[in-house]
Amino acid sequence: MNTVVFEICAFILSFFCIIYSVIVKRAQYSPPRDIIGKLSSQHFVFLNLLTNVMLSSLASVVGYFLELNRSADTVFFQHLFHIMYYVFHTALPVSFALYIMNINGATLGRKKSFFVYLLSLFMLSELLVLSNPFTHLVFYIDESYVYHRGPMILFQYLCGLAYVLVGIYFIIKNKAAIPKNDFLTICIAIIVALVGIALQAAFANLYVELFFEAIAFLAMMLLLEDRTGEVDPITGSGSRSAFIRNVTKLLETDQSFSVIGIKLINLEFYSSLFSGQDIDLILKNVYGWLASVYPSDYIFHFRNEDFAIIVYNRSEREVEEFANELLAKFNYTWQSEDLTARLEAGVSVIRVPEDSDSVSEISQILSAPDSWFHNGQRICLSDDINLIKRDILIEKAIRLAVNERRLKVWYQPIWSAETGKIVAAEALVRLFDPVMGHISSEEFIPLAEKIGLISDIGTFVYEETCSFISRNNIETIGLDYIEVNISVYQFVEDGIVDKLERIRKTYGVRPDQLNLEITESVSSDEAPNLNSRMQEMNSLGYSFSLDDYGSGYSNLIRLINSKYKNVKIDKYILWNSEKNKDTSRLLDSLIKIIRSLGLNVIQEGVENEAQLSRVLNSGCNLIQGYYFCKPVPEDEFLNFVKTFNSKKDRKK
């Protein structure tokens, strides 16, 4: 009895581990459906390991008692349980190798041929065991009903050793794909199992191998199989952390695959109509449908509006077809009990490693704002992904430049038709990134507004301009004021007037030396207090320019009601007027109407003499553009203005 007490303990321990894994932890896993899915499933293979230990120990215990009571009546059962022992014990090493490969992702995305080669030695070994009643190569029972090892038993052990070495090889090769704590757990489990094997080899009658293996698997169950934090609490799918773990595995094992992102564009609208519980039910329905068309192990839910699917073993064309199939589903309504929602979705397809080869970048692409799905576009492929990636890089560059105050302010002169001199200038922010080089303001300003950094940028430019005016007596070189761009998003913030006043007074600058240039890029409904804020600053001595008139929300009524000093006409109207007669007539009308209201007209984008003559003949009185000077750094700007204005004085 004492010789098999460890085998009995191994059976009990593995049995309860199986019960715990199947019943208590079943909510953390979805059973794979096909054979490849089963072999690639970490949890399924782990359950197989436990089952092999349990059945091996059961066969060993029963075989031991049969051996004690051996007779002609027991010989059949002796054969049966010895075969049972070898069948399940032989499966342990290959299950171990598969488990290790599943942990580090070496099996993900593999084709059937890979598993055929991997399992070929195991299948040969099992064939020897199953044919043993005819060959007696693995073991035999003599006339006295005593068990003996056969000539091929060494082959069985060598096969087991080969799979153990395969497992160790993949541990070392793909160590980077395994979290540090998981790696330590695996190493300790291997050491415990090897100690058991060594003890049994040293003491033939001390059956401790399976017990030590059961202890090792218990440790792995508690430390490796707990995926509580990787289950999305709303849908039951994999969470963001599960997605990151799986993508990391695939990247570290040099796999090629695709990630399909699904963004529920209008979910926020329904969130304002339905309760949180109703939205959860809709999300569960979405996940349930996704799981019906693709293995649930590779479906993940990030935030309310974001799902992701890892797709492998499919061609680029097949992935795109699948993405369109997913998108087509969202042409129909989603039912949740008594509620009906017509969800709109945008789908992005990221090829790995062609489009991206880092976990963080893939996650950022999937979390990109839904503004990418505009003008009816509902799917983003490689070209769109590259644009999203550029936005991600620009966002990083903006944040770095703001944090380290690495933005630059350049100045572009404004010429007066009345005096023939440079009378003002516009302060323009410039972003130079060490990696990306010069980034156009037309790219980074809209993005800064989206990510909430436009206020920081605007404050930086305003302060730099105040510092510039304070350090240089601009009136002596003929400048009346400097125009500073203020985003509407910044201008409607609480406390903005006090902030601007505090900066201005710090540098001793007069309000009339600053002209705040506002682009009305949002509607009056979105900025209801814009006019009242302008009136408050007008009373303090500030003046205002309206930027890019004709391209935004501006209209004549708004122009009349607001106290603007200058109106700057969008450069694209000028450029298009050269090609389109209707635009040309519009430009003439705009200039005449604005001038009739007693306002200055600044025409931006003037690049040649023909354009200059064109707008001057229409009544424009202030000019800004490359014809006179492009935006330049402070020193270059000062030298240009001094030289230009002094030449005009000499001509007089």
Image (cartoon, grey):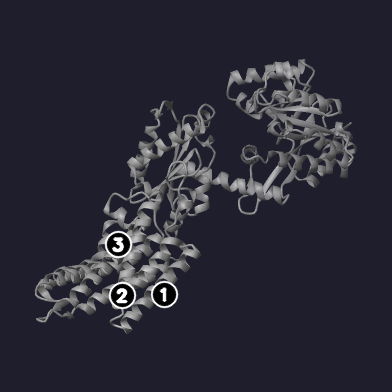
| Residue found 78% across the figure and 39% down from its top | 462
Q: Is residue 268 left or right of residue 162?
A: right
- Label annotation for residue 161: 2
Q: Is residue 68 left or right of residue 93?
A: left
Above or below residue 561? Residue 259 is below
N-terminal of the pair, mark 1 or mark 3, is: 3
The correct choice, above or below, for 334 with respect to 160 in the image is above
For mark 1, what is the residue? Answer: 191
Q: Residues within 10 Å of mark 3 (few under 14, many from 20)?
A: many
- Quadrant of the snapshot with the N terminus: bottom left
Mark number, residue 51? 3
The residue type indicated by label 1 comes to: Ile
**Residue type, label 3:** Thr
For marks 2 and 1, give the one nearer the viewer: 1
User: Which badge, 2 or 3, comes first in the chain's sequence?
Assistant: 3
**Whole-number angstrom distance, CA of label 2 to CA of label 3:** 20 Å
For badge 2, the amino acid type reads Leu
